[in-house]
């Protein structure tokens, strides 16, 4: 995207790279208070302890703000665009909307991080042309230099030390390509092939494997729905068949479907679902039910991997 195009786009997506708590509170509270003063809808989606920092600084100015604990709503980064950002922005389509979204914090695991970066890159596609500003804070003290470099690549504007600058490193499409990483599964993963006739067999196989690894009944229900959507997608969109793998990883059960289809829309699964919508809910539901979703697609096929806590 050219600099001129960025100037013409009403969507604004700055990163706030802060050096200490004071800088964090000043930058976020000013962003919120300016929106409130202008009569704009404002939402703040950050980890719970930081919610309290911002609320404390705003006092009664924060009464009309939508407050969201990102550690819950954004545990799976793939849920953030449809269920947090678009959900709020779409409810206020006739005015300029302000949102603070902090999807990357100290404590995010190496497993989660690629999904976080992909999310940040995809925000630019999801909101192109929208009259929305999404401010994304990054802790310059606790996060690595590589993470901060990725913030420069996924945000066209970076605010640091009180200065607002266009990022010369901005390249969200390059980030998406770099983090479209092949997903390696353990050699001991339980595996079954499936096609249209074997969809019930694949679901029963996954449930038996997860149950044997200690998954609770409630989460087995979630896993059943996830596996049904993944395998059906493979049959309908991935060449008619696929491979399902299930294994345990720490406190999670992992299931993945691999097929010969190619996922051409990187926002697939991140569009909000309309109440009257028929079809097109599969990957959205997978994101909604999973604690983490990872994907890889290339000319040879697509792998979608879901992580679900055992209990």
Image: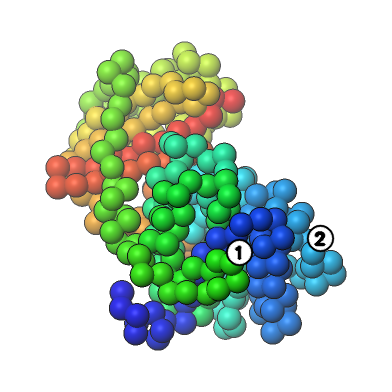
Judge left or right: residue 159 versus residue 21.
Answer: left
Q: Quadrant of the C terminus?
A: top right
In the depicted view, which residue is nearer to us: 276 or 176? 176
Note whether 17 is above or below 6 in the view shown.
Answer: above
Query: For residue 203, what is the image quadrant?
Result: top left
For marks 2 and 1, give the one nearer the viewer.
2
In the depicted view, which residue is nearer to us: 303 or 183? 183
Counting other residues with Cα less than 10 Å from the Cα at mark 1, is it few (<14), some (14-19), or many (20 or more)? Answer: many
Query: Label 1: which residue?
Result: 100
Note whether 12 is above or below 265 in the view shown.
Answer: below
Query: Residue at coordinates 24% horizontally, 43% vertically from top-left?
Result: 302
Note whether 131 is above or below 217 in the view shown.
Answer: below
Q: Position of residue 205 (x, y in %)?
A: 36, 21
Furthest residue in direction top, as rendered: 212
Disc 2 vs disc 1: Cβ atoms closer than 8 Å? Answer: no
Q: Position of residue 83 (x, y in %)?
A: 54, 56
Under circle 1, the secondary element is strand
Query: For residue 72, what is the image quadrant?
Result: top right
Furthest residue in direction right, as rendered: 60
Q: Quadrant of the N terminus?
A: bottom left
Q: Which mark is residue 306?
A: none
Under circle 2, the secondary element is helix
Q: CA distance from mark 2 to mark 1?
A: 16 Å
Query: Residue at coordinates 65% horizontally, 68% vertically from top-left?
Result: 27
Query: Label 2: which residue?
Result: 56
Total tally of numbered discs in the picture:
2
Judge left or right: residue 257 versus residue 126.
Answer: left
């Amino acid at each position: 995207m050219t600099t001129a195009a960025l100037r013409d786009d009403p969507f604004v997506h700055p990163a706030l790279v802060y050096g200490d708590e004071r800088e964090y509170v000043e930058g976020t509270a000013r962003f919120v208070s300016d929106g409130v003063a202008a009569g704009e809808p404002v939402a703040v989606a950050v980890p719970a302890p930081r919610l309290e920092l911002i609320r404390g600084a705003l006092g009664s100015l924060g009464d009309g703000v939508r407050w969201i604990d990102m550690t819950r709503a954004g545990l799976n980064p793939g849920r953030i665009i449809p269920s947090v950002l678009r959900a709020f922005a779409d409810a206020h389509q006739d005015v300029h909307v302000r949102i603070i979204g902090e999807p990357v914090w100290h404590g995010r695991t190496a497993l989660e991080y690629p999904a976080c970066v992909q999310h940040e890159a995809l925000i630019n596609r999801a909101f192109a042309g929208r009259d929305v500003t999404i401010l994304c804070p990054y802790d310059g003290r606790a996060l690595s230099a590589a993470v901060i470099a990725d913030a420069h690549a996924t945000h066209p504007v970076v605010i640091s030390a009180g200065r607002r600058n266009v990022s010369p490193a901005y390249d969200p499409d390059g980030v998406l390509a770099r983090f479209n990483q092949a997903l390696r599964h353990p050699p001991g993963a339980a595996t079954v092939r499936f096609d249209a006739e074997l969809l019930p067999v694949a679901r029963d196989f996954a449930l038996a494997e997860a149950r044997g690894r200690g998954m609770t009944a409630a989460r087995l229900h979630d896993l059943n729905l996830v596996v049904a959507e993944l395998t059906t997608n493979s049959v309908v969109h991935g060449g008619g068949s696929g491979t399902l793998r299930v294994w345990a990883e720490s406190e999670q059960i992992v299931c993945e479907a691999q097929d010969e289809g190619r996922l051409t829309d990187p926002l697939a699964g991140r569009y909000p679902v309309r109440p009257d919508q028929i079809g097109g809910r599969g990957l959205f539901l997978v994101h909604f039910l999973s604690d983490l979703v990872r994907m890889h697609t290339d000319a040879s096929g697509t792998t979608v991997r879901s992580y679900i806590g055992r209990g």
